[in-house]
Structures are given as C-alpha cells and as structure tokens.
C-alpha cells in the first residue's frame, strides 16, 4: 500500500527530530572539548595562581617549596629555544624551498618527501634516544643547552618544512613567470620574490614548532638533563670584550617542563602548587604563541590579494 | 649520492640554454647545493635514528636472546637477576592506547560529522583553531591534569581505583588526540563531492541520514586513516603515562591497574644514572626500537589507507 501524506509527514518529522538530536549531540561534544580545556586552565589557576609572584620568576629551585622559583628554568628555556630556532629555521626553510622550487621529479625527491612525512610521525622520545646516542655520547656534547636545542630543532624540523612548503605553494606561478621573464635566475626569483611573499606563512610554522618545543619534556629527560640546577649558565653577552661568548652552549641547564615534572613527582603537596604555577606559565606561553601564529596567518591571508 | 645529484643540478641551467652573466653562476650553484644539503638533513636524521637504535639494540641482543625479549612475560631490567620480556610494556602501551581510542573515536568522529555537515562555516572556522589548542597544550601539563584532576574525579566514580592507573592517563591522551581525529576526518568528509549529498537529499534523505549513510561511507578511508594516525600518537605519548600511570611493568589489560608503557620505561631509566654501555642503558634503545617500529607501521598503514581515498574521486 502506498504511504499516505500523513505517514510521510510522520516519517519526515521523525527524521527531523533525529537531525535536531544529533545537532545537539555534536554541539555537546564540542562544548565538552572546550569545557575540558577550560577545566585544565582553571584547575591550574586555582592551584598555582597564588604562587605566581615576581619572586617565583626570580628564585632558583629550592628544597623548601615556598622559596622555590623558576629562574633557572625559564632562562634555560629561552636559551634552548634560541638554539632550536637557530637550528631548525635555516635548515627547515632551505629544505622547504628545495622541495618546492628546485626538486626535480626523481627518486631523490621522493626519498626526501617520504622522510619528512615519516619524521613528523616519530614520537618525540625517539628524538631523545637519538640525541642520547649520537649527540651526548658519540659527539660528546654532554647534557648541555646545545644538545637540547639541537634535539628539539630536529624534532620541529618537519613542522617548519611543511609550513614553508605550504607558504611557498600559495605564491602564484604568475609572479615567478614575471620574474623569469625579466631574466632573473632561479635563486634570484626565490630570494627576491617567493621568499618575501611567504614570510608570514613560514613564521607561523616556526612559531607553532617552537610552541611545541617549549613544552616538550620527554626528549630532554632522555638526554639525562633531569638535575637540580640552582645557577644560571654564563651570560651570552658581557660588557667586556669580546662581548659575546658561547660558553653557555655547553652549560648544564633545566627548562620549564622539566622543572614542572620534577615538582609533580614530589610527594609534598606544597610542591604541587609550584608545579601548577609552572604549568600555568607554560600553558599561557604556548597559548600565546599559538594565538600569535593564528593571528599572523589570518593577517597574511587578509593583506595579500593576488 | 649527493655529489651526483649536485652535478645533475648544475647541468640543468645549461641544458635550458639560458644565457646569464658568469658571475651569477657560482651563486646559483652555491645556493642550490646548500638547499639540497638542507633537504638531505631530513634523510640524515632518519638514518641517524635507525643507526643509533639498531646499533645499541644489537649490543643489547647479544646479551638477551631475541626470543626471550619477545616471549618473556617479565620486564625487570634493574633487578638482581634481570629479565627482559617486552610483553608487559607492550600490554601497558596497548591498554592505554585502547582507552584513549575508546574516548577519542566517538568524540572525534561526532565532532567531525557535526563540523562538516551541520555547523555553519563561521562556527567551523572559529572552533577549529580552538580545538587545535587542545593538542598544543604541553604534555607535561596534561600529565599533571591526569594525576591531580582526572584520577581523583574517576576515583569518585570507580571505587577502589588506585592513585596510579591507566584509565586516567588513557582518557587524557584521548582528549589530546581528539583534534587529530576530528580535523583529519573532517577534511576527508569535506572532500566528498557535493553531488553525492545532493543526490541523497533529492531522494528525500535527512541531513543525518545523508551524513551517516552517504558521506561517512564515502570518506571511510580518510576517517580510518585518522584513527590510525591517532593510535600512533597515543602509542608514542610519554609524559602523561610517565606521570600518572605508575612506572611498574605489569602484564595486564585491566585499565584500573597501574602499569608502565614503553615510553614510561624509557623515561624511568633515563631519570636514573645508568652508565653508558651498560645493559640497562642498551635496554632503553631496544624498547625505543620496538616503539619506533610500532609507530612506523601505524604511520605507513595510515598513509596507505589515506592515499586510497585521495584516488577515489
């Protein structure tokens, strides 16, 4: 028997209800994710906000929770990030340029591409093992700022390469053709046209990579840098000649996530509010860096109209 | 290998027959060689990883037969009479990953379907970056969250849950990998051509029916690939389990018990002061090699599955 109009209405109504129910479920799942993010932040704030005094940033770690601070940790993080950026930025950008602008279609390009994809999926702790075997023991760089910076640099290399490629790919072919048409060489086209137009995209990738590196703990523990550090590395700049020195590169160090991990593992609850405060600093730092990256990308998209 | 490639590269402009000033040529050559050198660093890192892991593991396997490594049910490398069976660590890794998936697959898939088929473009563009922040939070902070927020919460629901367990960290890792699943699955669903949806609507299907019976099946390989890549992340996750799952190797699949994963074991050993070249030192490389092979096979599998859907349309 043919279904009557009434039956159809009932059927459609039922399906509509399912639609609405699912929309509610989807919205609920989204809200839940946002709620979890908020819970994480609020939990850290409740536990740690009281500890976030100026002294906290100016004190060394201590056996007494109330007097402990993150001075050596944040200085270490800044110095390690300098090395990481100095290592990953030139190599990553250059590799990205080669893959987009120079790479011929042959097996070598395929090998490089497969490697970049593969490296992006390697767990961070494996980079720690690589650094332990190669940098610490083979090259005898020790458990130093240089080792940590290079380790994290290798880890974020795929992020920098991929974002460089995406940024370069967004530059229209017509611009290259115009430059070639005026007789520019390949490197000139790349240096004077392709690179300047893709700076924003590249920067976005570098910032996201660094925001990942600054919170990374596992590889740093693996190279054996979980020690009590109550001193600062030698200053990179000084008032007397030669003004700049590189002794800090081989100095022992600690970084923010390591300091936080150290405090979490202690049974004394007083240290846990220190951990929460350090976590709060870390989360705010990474959120800030991510927001900056999103803003940069948004601005670049809006400003440039090809 | 690189030398011949460089030679080829310099031969290229000449073949094109472009005339350029003689001065421009050396700089072209230098630039191109440096760029190629940078690109090869990615290959060098992979080779470095394989070399270090295999070399130290080979030294390890001269002391421990590979059969014992794969079949012994105890992992006690720091005991008087050490035993090296990877199974307890694998069981811990697997259990934590399964808990994570049990959380992340439904949440991630529903979020993806909602964002792709129901949400307005504006909502989608605002929500996606915020979701991505979830995977941007440092893992050590998630570890703190698992130990001091999620586990106490779970202890109220599951009486008798110990302070260290695999359930809390599993759920927290699940939270961390939701953005991977939701964003990759959403990309796959949005790649499904509009005319399939239009055909479905024209047949009188509702939005949910279209989403579940037309779009989702058409995007299956992309969605499955996102699950596989998410598993690979969960397996390699370190700090959350090192902090909140306890560090005792334990051959069990019960998520309410404490256990160590492969990654947690590496952290535990690295925190101590093992002399370079000792068997304990080598054991973390053997564990690392196992982890590397595990994640590599997931990544390769995910890559193959994903390539299938790209060719579909």
Image: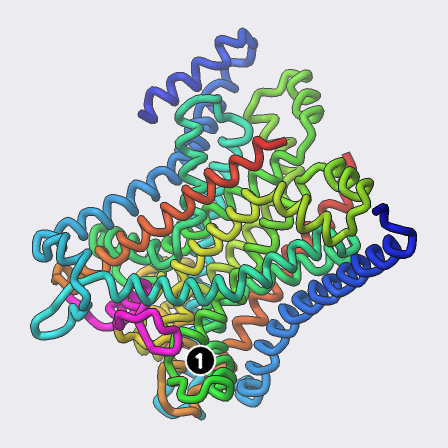
- Which residue is rendered at x = 68% and y = 52% of the image? A296
Above/below status of B74 relative to A294:
below
Assess whether residue B107 is covered by the magenta stretch: no
Q: Nearer the viewer, residue A290 or B77?
A: B77
* Chain letter for mark 1: B
Assess whether residue B255 is covered by the magenta stretch: yes
The location of residue B274, given as percent across then percent down, is 17, 68
Q: Nearer the viewer, residue B107 or A140?
A: B107
The location of residue A176, given as percent across then percent down, is 66, 24
Quarter occupied by the C terminus of chain B: top right
Q: Nearer the viewer, residue B208 or B300?
A: B208
Above/below status of B117 relative to A186:
below
- Which residue is rendered at x = 59% and y = 32% of the image? B312
Total number of numbered labels?
A: 1
Q: Main secondary structure of the magenta part?
A: loop
The location of residue A155, given as percent across then percent down, is 42, 52
Is residue B220 left or right of B249 when viewed as pictured?
A: right
- Dividing the picture into quarters, in which one does residue A229 lie? bottom left
Q: Which residue is mark 1?
A: B147
- Which residue is rendered at x = 48% and y = 22% of the image? A104
User: What colouring does the structure picture have?
Assistant: rainbow
Quarter occupied by the N terminus of chain B: top left
The location of residue A151, given as percent across then percent down, is 37, 55
Q: Is residue B302 visible?
A: yes
Is residue B95 left or right of A279 when viewed as pictured?
A: left
Q: Is residue A225 visible?
A: no
Is residue A267 left or right of B181 when viewed as pictured?
A: left
Q: Secondary structure at mark 1?
A: helix
Q: Residues within 10 Å of mark 1 (few under 14, many from 20)?
A: many
Magenta residues span: B249-275
């Amino acid at each position: 028997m043919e279904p009557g109009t009434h039956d159809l209405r009932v059927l459609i109504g039922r399906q509509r209800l399912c639609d609405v129910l699912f929309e509610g479920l989807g919205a609920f799942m989204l809200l839940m994710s946002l709620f979890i993010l908020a819970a994480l932040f609020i939990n850290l704030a409740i536990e740690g906000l009281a500890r976030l005094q100026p002294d906290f940033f100016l004190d060394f770690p201590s056996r007494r929770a109330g007097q402990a601070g993150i001075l050596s940790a944040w200085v270490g993080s800044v110095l390690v990030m300098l090395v990481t950026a100095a290592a990953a930025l030139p190599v990553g950008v250059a590799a990205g340029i080669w893959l987009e602008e120079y790479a011929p279609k042959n097996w070598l390009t395929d090998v490089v591409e497969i490697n970049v994809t593969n490296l992006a999926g390697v767990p961070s702790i494996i980079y720690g093992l690589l650094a332990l075997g190669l940098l610490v023991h083979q090259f005898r760089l020790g458990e130093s700022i240089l080792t940590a910076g290079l380790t994290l640099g290798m880890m974020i290399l795929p992020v920098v390469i991929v974002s460089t490629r995406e940024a370069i790919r967004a530059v229209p072919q017509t611009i290259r053709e115009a430059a070639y048409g005026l007789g520019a060489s390949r490197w000139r086209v790349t240096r004077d046209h392709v690179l300047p137009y893709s700076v924003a995209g590249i920067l976005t990738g570098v910032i996201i990579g660094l925001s990942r590196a600054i919170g990374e703990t596992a590889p740093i523990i693996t190279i054996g840098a979980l020690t009590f550090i109550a001193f600062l590395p030698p200053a990179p700049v000084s008032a007397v000649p030669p003004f700049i020195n590189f002794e800090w590169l081989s100095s022992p160090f600690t970084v923010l996530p390591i300091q936080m991990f150290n405090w979490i593992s202690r049974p004394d609850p007083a240290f846990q509010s220190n951990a929460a405060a350090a976590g709060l600093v870390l989360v705010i730092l990474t959120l800030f860096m991510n927001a900056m990256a999103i803003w940069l990308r948004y601005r670049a998209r809006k400003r440039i109209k090809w | 290998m690189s030398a011949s490639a460089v030679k080829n590269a310099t031969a290229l402009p000449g073949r094109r027959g472009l005339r350029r000033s003689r001065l421009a040529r050396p700089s072209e050559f230098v630039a191109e060689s440096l760029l190629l050198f940078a690109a090869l660093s990615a290959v060098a890192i992979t080779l470095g990883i394989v070399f270090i892991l295999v070399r130290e593991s080979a030294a390890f396997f001269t002391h421990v037969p590979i059969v014992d490594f794969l079949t012994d049910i105890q992992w006690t490398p720091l005991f008087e009479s050490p035993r090296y069976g990877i199974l307890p660590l694998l069981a811990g890794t697997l259990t934590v990953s399964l808990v994570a998936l049990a959380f992340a697959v439904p949440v991630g898939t529903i979020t993806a379907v909602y964002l792709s088929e129901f949400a307005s473009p504006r909502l989608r563009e605002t929500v996606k970056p915020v979701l991505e922040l979830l995977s941007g939070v440092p893992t050590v902070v998630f570890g703190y969250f698992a130990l001091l927020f999620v586990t106490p919460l779970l202890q109220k629901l599951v009486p008798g849950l110990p302070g260290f367990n695999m359930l809390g960290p599993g759920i927290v890792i699940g939270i961390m990998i939701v953005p991977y699943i939701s964003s990759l699955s959403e990309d796959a669903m949005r790649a499904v051509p509009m005319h399939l949806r239009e055909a479905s609507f024209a047949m009188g299907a509702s939005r949910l029916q279209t989403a579940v019976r037309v779009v989702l099946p058409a995007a299956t390989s992309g969605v499955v690939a996102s699950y596989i890549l998410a598993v690979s992340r969960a397996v390699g996750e370190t700090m959350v389990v090192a902090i909140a799952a306890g560090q005792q190797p334990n051959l069990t699949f019960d998520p309410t018990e404490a256990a160590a994963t492969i990654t947690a074991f590496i952290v535990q050993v690295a925190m101590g002061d093992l002399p370079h070249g000792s068997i304990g030192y080598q054991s973390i490389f053997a564990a690392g090699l196992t982890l590397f092979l595990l994640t590599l096979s997931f990544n390769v599998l995910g890559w193959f599955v994903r390539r299938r859907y790209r060719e579909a349309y």
